[in-house]
């Protein structure tokens, strides 16, 4: 299993039946491949659809039907389209039950930074600030450390924030961490790691709950 | 009745320095024939209000490549590297807005509201210089309305009365943009005599001109 599959399998089990869910581009999208049986979700794409299906076969693309990354989509029976004001009304208004986002940094207060590196990368925030601010449950999925091996789960974000104190769960290939008012609580670790290894790769201090840390199941 | 014109006639109405709003999301649901005509007309120093700056070879992105803007108000620039280059070299002023804030500012401009308070952007660079207020226990930012001289929108079907219907995710910013400009020009894939009133998304009274793509 690669990182995306591990994160996808565990992340998909955070959802409950009937939720309206918005998945970010990249690693977050992988969760849609592993939705457990018996769980039916409504997927939103913020450019204006709920209830989209898999990528169409070549030659069957509708140039008017894409996701927020401009990749072709299909729509399922029961799906619907709407304008951007309605789409962000759903998001900002708390009608989206869960959003899953990638990050550059996340910290122990639940702050997240994922939209710019000053002087280097300024692509714009798109819908990320609204999604992180308005969704009922905000899940961050990430590789536990960056490509240089530095922790991405910090005491305090150094990059400009996408949203303040909004993350509920942090999921990596090593750990599932809950963000609480008292800081980060380590809920689960991957089968091939230890609490000590996870803490050594995390800048923020992880609290070990009284009920113990579970081993992650895929 | 909306007047039927060509894309070139639409572009010829725009003068140097005008503010234009353009529908579309990464060029899906963008009036591409009008964008091409604006490139040909080579009008300069425009201000653009649009979700994004498209692709170098599609939609408003072509106007970026042709250096026709002095200012861009958008939520995302990542698919057109030329926007980032012009911004970092000081050739182009860019104001980034969260997408939901951008569309709501356009909506406010179109429906006569003086702005709104939103929780999006609190504690981020977006909040800099903005009035804040705690409403129902939550900190919010005051965001101001946006309007322009021209709205260029794209619909799937239009009728001779200017009524419009969109297709799939091609709807995006178009319905809000249609309310937020002095002159509204809609590019349509198909023109019909009239539509079922229940199918109309944008009321025809808002639309001044139609550019046909089906002839």
Image: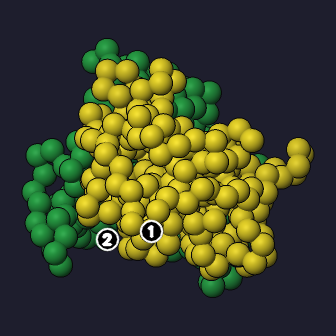
Quarter assignment of residue A117 = top left
In the image, taking residue B138 as reference, residue A25 lies left or right, namely right
Residue A211: which disc?
A: 1
Residue B164 image point, x, y percent: 59, 68
Q: Which chain is yellow?
A: A
**Pointer 2: what residue?**
B111
What's the CA distance linking mark 1 and mark 2?
54 Å
Quarter assignment of residue A31 = bottom right
Disc 1 or disc 2, which is closer to the eye? 1
In the image, taking residue A30 as reference, residue B80 lies left or right, namely left
Residue A110 image point, x, y percent: 32, 54
- Vertical relation: B91 (above or below) A122: above
Q: Depth check: A15 or B185 in front?
A: A15
Specify whether disc 1 shares its chain with disc 2: no
Residue A55 image point, x, y percent: 79, 52
Q: Secondary structure at mark 2?
A: helix
Q: Depth check: B204 or A33 in front?
A: A33
Instruction: Check the rendered structure and report the hue given to chain B.
Output: green
Quarter assignment of residue A4 = top right
- Vertical relation: A3 (above or below) A41: above
Which residue corresponds to the image point at 30% horizontal and 49% vertical from the top-left? A108
In the image, taking residue A94 as reference, residue B26 lies left or right, namely right
Q: Chain of mark 2?
A: B
* Other residues around mark 1 within 10 Å, as few (<14) / some (14–19) / many (≥20): few
């Amino acid at each position: 299993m690669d990182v995306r599959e591990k994160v996808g399998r565990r992340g998909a089990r955070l959802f409950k039946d009937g939720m309206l869910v918005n998945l970010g581009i990249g690693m977050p999208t992988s969760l849609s491949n592993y939705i457990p049986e018996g769980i039916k979700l409504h997927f939103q794409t913020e450019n204006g659809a709920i209830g989209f299906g898999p990528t169409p076969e070549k030659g069957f693309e509708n140039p008017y039907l894409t996701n927020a990354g401009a990749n072709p989509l299909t729509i399922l029976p029961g799906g619907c389209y709407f304008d951007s004001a309605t789409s962000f009304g759903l998001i900002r208004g708390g009608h989206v039950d869960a959003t899953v986002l990638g990050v550059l940094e996340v910290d122990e207060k639940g702050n997240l930074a994922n939209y710019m590196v000053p002087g280097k990368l300024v692509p714009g925030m798109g819908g990320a600030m609204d999604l992180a601010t308005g969704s009922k449950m905000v899940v961050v999925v990430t590789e536990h450390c960056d490509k240089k091996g530095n922790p991405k789960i910090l005491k305090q974000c150094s990059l400009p924030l996408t949203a303040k104190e909004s993350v509920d769960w942090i999921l990596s290939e090593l750990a599932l961490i809950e963000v609480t008012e008292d800081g980060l609580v380590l809920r689960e670790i991957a089968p091939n790691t230890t609490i000590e290894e996870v803490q050594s790769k995390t800048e923020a201090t992880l609290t070990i709950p009284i009920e113990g840390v579970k081993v992650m199941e895929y | 009745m909306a007047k039927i014109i060509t894309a070139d006639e639409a572009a010829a109405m725009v003068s140097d320095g005008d503010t234009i709003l353009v529908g579309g999301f990464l060029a899906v649901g963008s009036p591409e024939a009008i964008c091409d005509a604006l490139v040909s007309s080579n009008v300069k120093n425009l201000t653009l209000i649009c979700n994004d700056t498209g692709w170098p070879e599609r939609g408003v992105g072509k106007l970026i490549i042709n250096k026709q803007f002095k200012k861009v108000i958008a939520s995302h620039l990542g698919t057109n590297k030329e926007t980032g280059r012009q911004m970092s070299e000081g050739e182009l002023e860019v104001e980034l807005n969260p997408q939901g804030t951008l569309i709501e500012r356009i909506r406010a401009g179109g429906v006569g509201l003086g702005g709104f308070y939103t929780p999006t952007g609190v504690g981020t660079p977006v909040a800099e210089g903005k009035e804040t207020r705690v409403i129902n226990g939550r900190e919010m930012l005051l965001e101001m309305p946006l309007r322009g001289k021209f709205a260029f929108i794209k619909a799937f079907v239009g009728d001779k009365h200017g009524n419009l219907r969109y297709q799939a995710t091609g709807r995006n910013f178009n319905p809000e943009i249609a309310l937020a400009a002095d002159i509204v020009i809609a590019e349509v894939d198909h023109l019909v005599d009239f539509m079922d009133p229940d199918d109309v998304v944008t009321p025809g009274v808002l639309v001044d001109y139609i550019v046909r793509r089906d002839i």
